[in-house]
Every structure is written in structure tokens, then in C-alpha cells.
Image: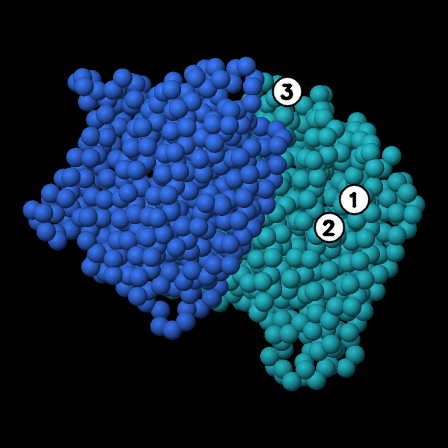
């Protein structure tokens, strides 16, 4: 069998499902075996996903650049296919997913002692959904993976979460569901418009044929407006953009550590990915129409998230609101329709995944020892737990956008793009980098320096420094933060094709005049 | 009556004979469970075989009053599945409560005969006959626990309102008959085509007839605002009966709607479409809103079944607006709903095996830990009822929504209303999951053993819920055939 014939994307996507079934079959008392099986599967999926890089050819022209494609007819009556394929953006995000999944599973070994089996199975199913979203090239299939993500996350927050977990998890599900169901209507409507125009269901859900259709015939103005709004709502809730962000702090605070990590690192990226992959190229005119409004919302998110983060007393909430702010950069970068901007947005997606994932892990580490997350109770951590404090410092600086680390690259590129769009936008966004430095460094100062607080002193020998396993979970993230900070070209080259082709499609779009804006 | 007629109605005959046979077996061997079940399942297998055989080609009998087409076959198979599954789930519930199994099975099979008669009716009188044969056993079943006050109350409400609605429905039929001069479905359709061909507005008589017919069937499918009997009848009935009532008579009534509204009243569909639109919107929204506040799972499922009626009506509206996909979606939804809803009721019934266990949400607390398999299955059914992929419920919803989107305004607004409702429904369906996995049981949890029949039934419903979600193609072909059969060229 030829190497090219190996259905590697299906293997990566469904390997975790096999793992979940395996985990479900292991007897309940064999906790060690359960954990090992889950970690093993996740590692295997990770290794397979790295193979994607080996065979990937970055500079295929145009958007015909989807590689490793697999196409099987699924529901032929409606032209629905099982169609998967990846371009540079997908490859990057798939690898981010597989990496963070095994890290999260490893990081859960300590904290999760109850119902380990269900937990590990949920996590692996979650991985199936996330990878599926990034590789699906059929809108129906995409929607299915999109919704599959919801269920395990709902369980992870609801079963293993904090005191107020049920409220948080139901809020998370309902918010997401409202958006995604409207997107379902939009997907079906898009397919129908295609069917009505071509007279056949063949290719009606196929991403490539829809995109070709959008580029040649194009969807009508009114249709674009409504369809874009529906997609926008689904993605904006997921990102989350201001004012749809209110589920995020609740979900983050209540979720177990690994749940927060995945939520921040991957789930939020699903929304941004959706914008780049679907909303922009399929409905370019509507995207151009709404871009100014979305840029305004992004700026609000950037500043608002930062200001609210400044006053948070709880470490986890602070990181959660910093996510709102950082993801604002992503949506800003996407909607200024400018090469550097979109490159920056993508780099920011990856770097935010790495850095915020690490920050949530670090909050988890200290919470496990102190059972507390209040900044006010900490203080002087540098003395009793120097390794922890140093690691925290590293990721805090990375998050604040220290040059030489990945966080800087993304924000800098977005700012360059934003400046080309409008100096004012760039100025407001840049303000946020100062605010980010303020809330992050102030937090770090209060937590790490000064006198060791009475609370920490009272813990005595319970306050131990990082264990090797915990360090092991953070090393890959830290390494990648440095590598992408120093050699952003590695990432930029990978996603260049995607950026150019999406911008090409959007560039063809001219804003639709809404009667009330004229 | 020709020999060919007998052959054509063979499944129906077999079904009626089966009901009689069950009663006879019980008389010969009173109180024995095994013979009754053996006869029931052997009989249902024969009926199924006959449905397949007669369904090979379309045919009519009795001068065109009875018709066998792909729609008949599809619906009959669905009815047999409903009855077979209900019988699988019933013994474990009935025995501890000293409720007789044989009467239960026989009554169910009689109801099934009525439903089969509806699905094959090509004449308004046969339609009414089938309807009554289907609903009368339903009243009996609702009051099956005759010493239980709630059961009796529910049965009386169901009976009184049901009789009223039957009378109203019959009154409507009389109007249609009077104006068209025929009771044949095809004849009515032809006459109506001629009447509306000139483009004149509906006559007052026809409009009244339509109104009565709509009200009559709206009662039977429990559409808002004709749904008031549902919660009491559902909550009061023994749980396996509730499961049956939530799917059997509902699908049966939809069969009636297809034969009557789609076929006979097809030519005036533009006139009844707006009414169904309003009914659909009201039914979905009110059913879900009220279900939100329920703390009893049976009552919650009763209100949610009202909401599901609404989703199915969306398909009907889309059909009336000219999209045959709407009818296909309605049929698909009916099949999907049958299996997921029966599955959910089966779990409730299994938990209530010990008499005295209520169907309140507290019964479900900690179920995921006590009985992991039941917990997972219930989660699956709840997700499917919510419409989360990859389950049958999701594809059913996607199907009717697609049809609504295709139909254009004003039907596509129903698509938006439907999805917002689905999001609302997620709240109460997932609350069951919350109780199962995120709450600890109050008091000493009891683990009961479940009979092998229950497991078989659960396996079937689970299998259908997953397969109709993951691989919908086969069923899509079947419902497409069935829908095409009734649409006039």
C-alpha cells in the first residue's frame, strides 16, 4: 500500500474514539491502566499528527491546497460527504490540539481521582470533536463535529468542576447551542441556495465547491447578510467576542484545570477558525459589510477584557478575562482583511493556546496545593517554590507579549495590520498591551514577590515545588513559545497559503450597502 | 369481496387475529407470562412478514377504499416496532404491580390494527374507523392501573376530550363529504381540485369543514392549544403505556393527517398551510416552555412530546408550501422520535420496576454511578431528543429544518423558531443528565435487576437512535419512497 493512501486524517481523528472505547472497557478498579490507556492513545494521536508536517507541502497555490484528502459519500441524496482534508492552518491547529490533549490528560493524573474512567473517555471524545472540526471539509460533517465537542465539555465541567459547576456548564451549553443551531439553519440554507442555483445536491455541502461557487457566482446580498450573521453568532459566542463572552469566566472558573486548558487553548480557537475557514470566504461581501462593526467589538473586547482582568481577585478569572482580551486581537486581525493582520491572528491563536494553556496549568498547580486561587492570599511564592515562580514568570511575560516569545509575534503582526487599516485602531489595540503588562505583572508581583503570606506559611510542607510530571507538562509549551517567538517563520510559512487564499476571496468582496448605513 | 382483497389486507387481518389469539391464550393458560409473550412476538413476526410481502407492490382493495403503497408499508412497520418495543418493556413494570400482561398485549395489538387501518385508508369512513379503533384501546390503556386514582383521572380526561375531538373530526368529515359528494380520498381530491381551479376563495362550508378537521386532528396529535389532556394522561398512565401513548397514537394521527390533509385536502393546501404554521409555532414553543418547569420526568417527557409534535408540524408546513422534503422529514422525524422516545420511557420504566418508585427527577440522582449502562443510554436518548449529532434526533431535526428553509418565507421563519426551541429544550433534557451524573442520590440508592426483554428493547432503540443518526441514507430512501407515493403527479 502506498504511503499516500493511508487515511491519516481519519486515523488521527478517530484514534481517540478507539481510545475512549478502550478506556470504557477497562474495569473500574484498574485506575492506573485507565490513565495509561488514555495517555497512550493521546500520545499516539499526537505522533500521527506530527506526520502531517512531514508530508505537507506548504506552497501549493490557491485554496486547492487541501491535502491528505479523503472523500466518501455519506448521505448521497443531499450530497453530504465524509470529506476531510487539511491546509496549513488546519495542520497547525490539529497539532496544537493533539499536543494539548496529551498534556491535559497527563496533568489530570493528580487532580482527578473520582470517576477517572468517565473523565478520560470524555476527554478523548472531546479530542475527536476538536480534530474533526479542524479537518472537516463538508459543512454537515463540520457541524456534527462542532456539536460533538459540546457534550464531553459539558460533562467535564459539570461532573469534575467546582462548586458552582452545574450553573456554569448549563450556561456554557445553552450559549453555544443557540449560536450553533442558528448556524445549522445557515448551513442548510447555504446548501439549498447552492442546490437551487446548480439544480443538484452534488457538492451542496462540500466546502471546496461552495467556495468555488462563492468565488464565481456568489451568494445574493440578502442571503449573505443573514447567513453571515448566523455563522458570526456561532463563532462569536465560541471565541468569545464581546458581548457574548459572559459564559467564559463562569466556565473557566468552574472547570477542572485540564478542562480550562482545553477550553482556552482549543475551544476558543474553533470560533476563530470558523471565521477564517467559513464565514469569510463563503460570504465575503457580508463580511466586508460587518467588518467595521466586528473590529469595533474586537477593540471593545481587547480593552474591556484587560480592564476587567485588572481587578480580578481570582487567578483563574484573571486568566479567563485575559483570554477575552487576547482573543480580541485574533478577531481584530482577521477582520482587518490584511495579510499581516491575518497572519498575526493565526499566530496569536497558536501562541494564546500555548501560553494560556500553560497559565491555566500553573493556576491548577498552585490550586492543588493551596485549594485556593485568591491573589490576595498568595504572596512571596518565589521563596518557598522558586521553580514554580520562575515558570509562572516566564509564561506571564510571554502572555504580556515580551519580544522573543510567541505572544509578541502575533500581537505585533496584528498591530502592523491594524495600523495599515487605521492608526486609531492600532493605537487602541496597542493600549491594551500596556494594560496586559499591567494586570499580568501586577498579579505576578503580588503572587510571587514580597513577604511569604500567612496563608502560605500556614500550609507548611504541603506547599511543595513543582513535581517532575508537572514540569513535563509545561516544557513542551514553553519550548514552543520560545521557538515560535524566535522563528515565527516556521508557523507563518505553514499558514501563508491559507491567508493568501482567504484574503484573495475576501478582497473580491465589496461591502453590501445596508440601507440604514448609507 | 374477492380473494385478492383478502390478500391485500392480510397484515391487518393477521393483526386482528393476533389480538384475539392473545386473549384466547390467556383464557387457556391464565396468568402465565411466557405463552402470552411467545404468541405476541410470533404473531408480530408474522404481521411483519406479511407487511413486507404485501408491500412488494402497490395495490388497492374493496373498490379502492383500502390502499397498500410504500407509505402504508413504512407506517405499518413503524407501528409494529412501537408495539413490539412496548411489549418488551412492559412485563417488568406490570408484574410487580399485578397488572395483567395478556390484556395489555391484546389491547395494544388492537390499537395497532387501528393504526394500520389508518395508514391504508383511502376512504374517509375507513379513516375514521381506523382512528376510533386506534384510540379506543388507548383510553383503556391509560386507565390500565384501575386502582390508581391518577391513572383513572388521566384516562377519563383522555377519554372525554378524545371523544369530543372524534366527534368534531367526524363533523368535519361530514362537511367535506357534503361538499364533494364522495368519501373516497382520491374523489375528494379531484372534487376539490375542480372547486379551487377557478381561483375562487373557499366556500364557508368547506372552510368550516377544514376548521373542524384541523381541530380534530390537532387534539389527536396534542398540538397546542388542543393539548390539555396530554400531561395528565401521560403522567397518570403506567409508564410503558405512557411510552406507547407518546408515540403510537401520535404517529397514527400523523398517518391520518397525511392521508387526509396531504392526499384528500391536498388541492387546498395553500389554505390550511397558514393554520398549520401557527399550530407548529405554538406547539413547539409552548411545549418546551412548560417542559422547562417540570420536575417529574414523565410529565416533562409529556410536554416535550408536545414540542416534538411541533417539529413534525414544521415538516408538514414545509410540505404544504410545496417542498416534498417536508413530508419526508416528517416521516423521518416520526421514526427517529419513536425509537429515542421509547428508549427514554424504557429507562424510566426500568427504574420504576419496584412499585412506589416515582418518576420524579430525584429518582435519577446518581444514576450514572448506580447503573452506568442505564445512565449512558438515558444520556444518549436525552441528547437525541435535544437534537445533538450524531443521533437520529439530530438528523430528523435537520431534515425538517432543511425542508422549512427550502420552502422560503414564511415557512423558513419556522426554521428559526424550531432551532431556538431546540436550544431551549436542551435545558430540560440536560437537566436529567445533570441529575444522573452531577447529583448524589438522596437516601439509600437501590439497584434493581432488569429482565432480558428490557435489555433487548433498549438495545434495539439504542441501535436505531445511533444508526439513524450516523447512517441516515437507508431510511432517507425509505421515507422518500413513502412520501412520493402520496403526492399527486
Cβ–Cβ under 8 Å for marks 3 and 2: no
Q: In the depicted view, which residue is nearer to us: B220 or A279?
A: B220
State the CA–CA distance, disc 1 to disc 2.
9 Å
Q: Are marks 3 and 1 in contact (CB under 8 Å)?
A: no
Vertical relation: A332 (above or below) B53 = below
Marks 1 & 2, CB-CB < 8 Å contact = yes
Q: Position of residue B266 (x, y in %)?
A: 46, 23
Q: Nearer the viewer, residue B405 or A10?
A: B405
Instruction: Judge left or right: residue B27 versus residue A123.
Output: left
Q: Which mark is residue A241?
A: 2
Farthest residue toward the right? Answer: A423
Query: Tag 1 or tag 3, which sits nearer the N-term?
Result: 3
**Front-lying residue, B47 or A181:** B47
Q: Residue at x 43, y 34 (%)?
A: B213
Shade representing chain A? cyan
Which numbered tag is attached to residue A294? 1
Q: Chain of mark 1?
A: A
Look at 31% across and 28% down and name the residue there. B125
Residue extending farthest to the left is: B28
Which image quadrant: the C terminus of chain B? top left
Relative to B363, is B85 on the left or the right? Answer: left
- Indicate which disc residue A197 carries: 3
SS type, badge 3: helix
Amino acid at each position: 500500500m502506498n504511503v499516500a493512501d493511508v487515511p491519516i486524517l481519519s486515523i488521527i481523528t478517530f484514534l481517540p474514539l478507539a481510545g475512549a472505547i478502550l478506556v470504557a472497557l477497562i474495569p473500574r478498579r484498574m485506575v492506573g491502566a485507565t490513565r495509561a490507556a488514555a495517555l497512550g492513545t493521546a500520545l499516539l494521536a499526537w505522533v500521527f499528527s506530527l506526520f502531517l508536517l512531514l508530508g505537507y507541502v506548504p506552497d501549493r497555490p490557491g485554496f486547492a491546497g487541501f491535502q491528505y484528502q479523503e472523500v466518501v459519500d455519506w448521505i448521497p441524496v443531499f450530497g453530504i460527504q465524509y470529506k476531510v482534508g487539511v491546509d496549513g492552518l488546519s495542520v497547525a491547529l490539529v497539532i496544537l490540539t493533539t499536543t494539548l490533549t496529551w498534556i491535559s490528560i497527563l496533568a489530570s493524573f493528580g487532580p482527578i481521582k473520582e470517576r477517572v474512567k468517565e473523565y478520560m473517555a470524555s476527554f478523548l471524545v472531546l479530542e475527536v470533536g476538536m480534530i474533526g472540526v479542524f479537518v472537516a471539509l463538508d459543512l454537515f460533517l463540520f457541524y456534527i463535529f462542532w456539536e460533538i465537542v459540546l457534550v464531553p465539555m459539558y460533562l467535564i465541567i459539570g461532573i469534575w468542576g467546582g462548586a458552582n459547576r452545574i450553573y456554569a456548564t448549563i450556561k456554557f451549553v445553552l450559549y453555544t447551542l443557540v449560536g450553533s443551531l442558528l448556524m445549522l439553519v445557515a448551513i442548510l440554507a447555504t446548501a439549498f441556495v447552492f442546490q437551487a442555483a446548480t439544480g443538484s445536491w452534488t457538492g451542496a455541502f462540500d466546502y471546496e465547491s461552495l467556495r468555488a461557487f462563492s468565488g464565481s457566482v456568489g451568494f445574493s446580498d440578502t442571503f449573505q447578510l443573514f447567513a453571515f450573521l448566523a455563522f458570526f453568532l456561532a463563532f462569536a459566542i465560541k471565541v468569545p467576542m464581546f458581548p457574548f463572552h459572559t459564559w467564559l469566566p463562569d466556565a473557566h472558573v468552574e472547570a477542572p484545570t485540564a478542562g480550562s486548558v482545553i477550553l482556552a487553548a482549543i475551544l476558543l480557537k474553533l470560533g476563530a477558525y470558523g471565521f477564517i475557514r467559513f464565514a469569510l470566504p463563503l460570504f465575503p461581501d457580508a463580511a466586508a459589510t460587518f467588518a467595521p462593526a466586528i473590529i469595533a467589538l474586537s477593540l471593545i473586547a481587547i480593552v474591556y477584557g484587560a480592564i476587567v482582568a485588572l481587578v480580578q481577585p481570582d487567578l483563574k478569572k484573571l486568566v479567563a478575562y485575559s483570554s477575552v482580551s487576547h482573543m480580541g486581537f485574533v478577531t481584530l486581525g482577521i477582520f482587518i482583511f490584511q495579510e499581516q493582520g491575518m497572519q498575526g491572528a493565526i499566530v496569536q491563536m497558536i501562541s494564546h493556546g500555548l501560553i494560556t494553556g500553560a497559565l491555566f496549568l500553573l493556576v491548577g498547580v498552585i490550586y492543588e496545593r493551596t485549594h485556593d486561587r485568591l491573589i490576595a492570599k498568595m504572596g512571596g511564592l518565589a521563596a518557598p517554590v522558586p521553580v514554580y515562580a520562575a515558570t509562572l514568570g516566564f509564561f506571564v511575560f510571554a502572555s504580556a507579549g515580551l519580544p522573543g516569545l510567541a505572544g509578541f509575534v502575533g500581537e505585533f503582526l496584528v498591530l502592523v495590520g491594524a495600523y495599515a487599516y487605521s492608526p486609531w485602531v492600532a493605537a487602541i489595540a496597542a493600549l491594551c498591551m500596556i494594560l496586559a503588562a499591567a494586570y499580568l505583572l501586577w498579579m505576578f508581583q503580588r503572587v510571587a514577590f514580597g513577604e511569604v503570606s500567612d496563608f502560605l506559611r500556614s500550609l507548611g510542607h504541603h506547599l511543595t515545588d513543582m513535581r517532575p510530571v508537572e514540569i513535563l507538562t509545561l516544557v513542551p509549551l514553553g519550548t514552543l513559545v520560545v521557538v515560535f517567538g524566535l522563528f515565527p517563520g516556521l508557523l507563518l510559512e505553514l499558514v501563508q497559503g491559507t491567508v493568501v487564499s482567504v484574503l484573495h476571496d475576501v478582497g473580491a468582496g465589496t461591502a453590501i450597502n445596508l440601507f440604514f448605513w448609507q | 369481496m374477492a380473494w385478492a382483497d383478502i390478500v391485500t389486507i392480510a397484515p391487518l387481518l393477521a393483526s386482528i387475529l393476533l389480538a384475539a389469539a392473545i386473549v384466547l391464550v390467556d383464557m387457556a393458560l391464565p396468568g402465565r407470562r411466557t405463552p402470552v409473550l411467545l404468541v405476541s412476538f410470533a404473531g408480530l413476526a408474522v404481521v411483519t412478514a406479511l407487511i413486507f410481502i404485501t408491500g412488494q407492490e402497490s395495490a388497492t382493495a374493496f373498490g379502492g377504499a383500502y390502499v397498500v403503497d410504500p407509505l402504508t408499508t413504512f407506517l405499518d412497520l413503524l407501528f409494529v416496532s412501537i408495539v413490539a418495543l412496548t411489549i418488551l418493556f412492559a412485563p417488568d413494570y406490570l408484574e410487580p404491580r399485578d397488572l395483567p400482561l395478556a390484556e395489555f398485549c391484546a389491547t395494544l395489538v388492537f390499537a395497532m390494527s387501528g393504526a394500520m387501518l389508518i395508514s391504508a385508508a383511502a376512504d374517509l369512513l375507513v379513516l375514521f374507523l381506523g382512528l376510533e379503533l386506534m384510540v379506543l384501546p388507548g383510553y383503556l390503556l391509560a386507565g390500565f392501573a384501575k386502582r390508581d386514582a391518577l391513572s383513572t383521572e388521566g384516562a377519563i380526561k383522555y377519554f372525554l376530550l378524545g371523544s369530543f375531538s372524534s366527534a368534531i373530526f367526524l363533523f368535519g368529515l361530514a362537511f367535506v363529504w357534503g361538499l364533494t359528494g364522495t368519501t373516497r380520498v382520491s374523489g375528494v381530491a379531484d372534487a376539490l381540485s375542480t372547486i379551487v381551479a377557478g381561483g375562487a376563495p373557499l366556500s364557508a362550508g368547506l372552510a368550516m369543514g377544514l376548521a373542524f378537521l384541523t381541530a380534530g386532528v390537532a387534539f389527536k396529535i396534542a398540538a397546542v392549544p388542543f393539548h390539555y389532556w396530554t400531561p395528565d394522561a401521560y403522567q397518570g398512565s403506567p409508564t410503558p403505556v405512557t411510552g406507547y401513548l407518546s408515540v403510537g397514537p401520535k404517529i397514527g394521527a400523523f398517518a391520518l393527517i397525511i392521508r387526509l390533509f396531504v392526499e384528500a385536502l391536498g388541492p387546498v393546501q395553500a389554505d390550511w398551510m397558514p393554520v398549520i404554521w401557527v399550530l407548529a409555532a405554538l406547539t413547539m414553543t409552548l411545549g418546551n416552555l412548560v417542559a422547562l418547569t417540570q420536575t417529574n420526568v414523565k410529565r416533562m417527557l409529556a410536554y416535550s412530546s408536545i414540542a416534538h409534535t411541533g417539529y413534525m408540524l414544521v415538516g408538514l408546513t414545509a410540505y404544504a408550501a410545496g417542498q416534498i422534503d417536508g413530508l419526508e422529514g416528517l416521516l423521518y422525524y416520526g421514526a427517529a422520535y419513536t425509537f429515542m422516545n421509547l428508549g427514554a420511557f424504557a429507562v424510566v420504566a426500568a427504574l420504576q420496576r419496584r412499585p412506589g418508585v416515582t418518576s420524579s427527577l430525584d429518582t435519577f440522582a446518581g444514576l450514572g454511578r448506580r447503573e452506568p449502562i442505564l445512565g449512558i443510554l438515558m444520556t444518549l436518548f436525552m441528547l437525541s431528543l435535544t437534537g445533538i449529532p450524531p443521533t437520529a434526533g439530530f438528523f430528523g431535526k435537520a431534515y425538517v429544518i432543511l425542508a422549512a428553509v427550502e420552502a422560503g418565507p414564511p415557512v423558513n421563519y419556522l426554521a428559526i423558531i424550531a432551532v431556538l426551541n431546540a436550544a431551549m429544550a436542551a435545558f430540560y433534557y440536560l437537566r436529567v443528565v445533570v441529575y444522573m451524573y452531577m447529583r448524589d442520590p438522596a437516601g439509600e440508592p437501590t439497584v434493581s435487576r432488569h429482565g432480558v426483554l428490557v435489555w433487548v428493547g433498549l438495545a434495539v432503540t439504542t441501535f436505531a437512535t445511533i444508526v439513524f443518526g450516523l447512517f441516515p441514507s437507508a431510511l432517507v430512501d425509505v421515507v422518500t419512497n413513502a412520501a412520493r407515493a402520496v403526492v399527486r403527479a
